[in-house]
Amino acid sequence: MRMSTGRHRRTRTLSIAAAVAVSAGAGGVCLGLSDGGAEAASSTVTVSTTAQLETAVRNAVAGTVIQVRGGTYYPTATLKSTASGTSSARITLQAYGTEKVRIDGSKLPAGSWLAGIYGSYWTVQNLTFQSSPAQGFVVTSSTGGIFRNLVTGNNGDSGFTLRGDNTVNNLVQNLDSFGNYDAAGHGQNADGIAVKFGSGTGNRITGARLYNNSDDGLDLWQFSTAVTIEHSWAFGNGRNRWSDAAFEGNGNGFKLGGGGVAVAHAVNNNAAWDNTLNGFTENSNTGAIALNRNTAYANTEAGFYFATGKARLARNLAVGNKGGPDERGSSAVSAANSWDSGVSTPAFTSTDATTAYGARKADGSLPATTFLTTGSTTVGSTMN
Ligand SMILES: [Ca+2]
Ligand SMILES: [Ca+2]
């Protein structure tokens, strides 16, 4: 069901009519048109079975909107697409209305990812990807992706991954990624979100909760272009929650490098707590990572570990980390942080994390919480 650009233009009117007809239906499946097989310029496909979901993803082209009815879906092969939308005709995969959709990988063959997107200009939103035998959701060398209000939980490797060169201008907004654990690696690989082994400008992660993963909350290993990370929380990572006698999970909240790259990521207004290693670490990245107004609380190692690089730390807050607030080398620049001289450490309004684990707001943004807030306008994360 491929189409030429010319065909696409000539069928536009018809496809709009078809889309209207579809949305007037009773939630059934509506695929394509009756004009000889040309794909619609903007076709809405509503799916309610696993087979329909698999077909719809396989056949998606620019302008396709796939709406998934509430329920749990069990793909038998990776949901995969190499198709690209355009900035004006995106490919959209989303829950139908406010219905709860879980895409569950527990019937996939061993080693399979649950979803793999290799194209550009996708919007994927309001969906859960869970219980994959390997990675949950993987985006490879994509431009202009919007990945919003997704949950990636209890997968057999990292929950959400951006990777590859030409990874450009992707937005990951309001991701919940938790409980991911690679049994085969004894937990050494499964991060909440991995932006690894690649490059490309304009990638941003915001509003994420990355928790209880076997390895790190966020990992930027060998991603050689600056990534922006803001308003995200990483907590409870690296603990052996799987009774793995040979457990090898790391447990940094935010792992901001590795593999020889030197890159100035931007890390603003995040929080890391209760991780088994550092709250925030360069992980050998010697670049000028900029960290502003982040909070590290009660991590097992340092709050902020920047021993070798040129990181610039300002207005961060570190309290109760067993390895101390900061571990800095002479190349790092530190000013106006809670550990710097002349700066007072504000008291937390609350150290009860219960509300931080709670339900998100209706628009998918982080839950309101007083946890780790201080009211300070100068130091630490605002926790929103
Ligand atoms: Ca690891
Ligand atoms: Ca990792």
Image (cartoon, rainbow, N blue to C red):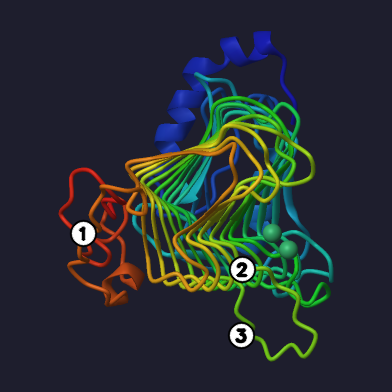
Residue displayed at 30% across by 51% down: 380
Residue displayed at 62% across by 27% down: 168
Residue 128, given in percent of the width and then of the height, sits at: 52, 62
Residue displayed at 66% across by 8% down: 6
Using the image, determine if residue 63 lies above or below residue 277.
above
Kindly report which numbered mark, 3 or 1, lies closer to the viewer in this rendering: 1
Kindly report which numbered mark, 2 or 3, lies closer to the viewer in this rendering: 2
Residue to which mark 3 is pinned: 241
Residue to which mark 1 is pinned: 346
Q: Amino acid at mark 3?
A: Arg
Viewer-nearest residue: 80 or 34? 80
Asked which secondary structure carries label 1, the reply is loop
Residue 251: which disc? 2
Viewer-nearest residue: 33 or 333? 333
Q: Are marks 2 and 3 in contact (CB under 8 Å)?
A: no
Residue 101, given in percent of the width and then of the height, sits at: 48, 63
Q: Is residue 196 left or right of residue 229?
A: right
Residue 94: which disc? none
Q: Is residue 276 left or right of residue 354?
A: right
Viewer-nearest residue: 2 or 378? 378
| Circle nearer the N terminus (1, 2) | 2
Q: Is residue 313 left or right of residue 278?
A: left
| Circle nearer the N terminus (3, 1) | 3
Asked which secondary structure carries label 2, the reply is loop
Q: Amino acid at mark 1?
A: Pro
